[in-house]
Image (cartoon, rainbow, N blue to C red):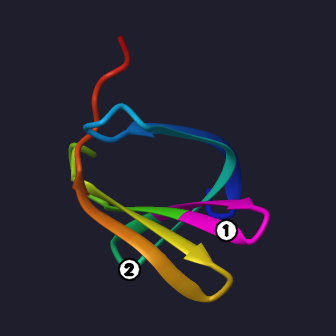
Amino acid sequence: MNGTGNVSYQGCDVNGKCLRLRGGKIVCRDGVCRTAWKNANYTYILEQPITENGNADSTLIVRKGRTEVLKVTDLKAIPDR
């Protein structure tokens, strides 16, 4: 349901630097689901198109205030081990 959730996210880059987020809220509309987390002045947004199998690549956007400071596209999901 929109505006709900307590979603966690963990992602690592090729150098092994990882990002862990907790307490995200989900909003889905116009064929895209966005999960957002807030940490001090930063907002982290994970966007994923809605597909039948749910396996679409994601985009991570990081904003400081209203300024976009990072956008990483084509993120692949790795199943839990």
Secondary structure of residue under mark 1: strand
Q: Residue at x 37, y 18 (%)?
A: 80
Q: Amino acid at mark 2?
A: Asp
Q: Which image quarter is the C terminus in? A: top left
Residue 37 part of the magenta segment = yes
Q: Residues within 10 Å of mark 2 (few under 14, many from 20)?
A: few
Please name which of the two marks, 1 or 2, marks the residue nearer to the observer: 1
Which region is colored magenta?
Answer: 34-44
Identify the element where label 2 is drawn.
Answer: loop
| Image height of 80 relative to 55, above or below | above
Residue 1: quarter of image: bottom right
Q: What's the residue at 49%, 82% (across, down)?
A: 68
80 to the left or right of 57: right
Give coordinates of residue 25: x percent, y percent.
Answer: 66, 56
The tag on residue 78 is none
Q: Which of these two is toward me, 53 or 63? A: 63
**Numbered label attached to residue 42:** 1
Q: Amino acid at mark 1?
A: Tyr
Vertical position of residue 79 compared to residue 49: above or below = above
* Magenta residues, dominant SS class: strand
Give coordinates of residue 43: x percent, y percent. 63, 68
Are circles 1 and 2 on residues that touch, CB within 8 Å?
no
Residue at screen point 23% across, 43% down: 76
The label shown at residue 30 is 2
Of callouts 1 and 2, the N-terminal one: 2
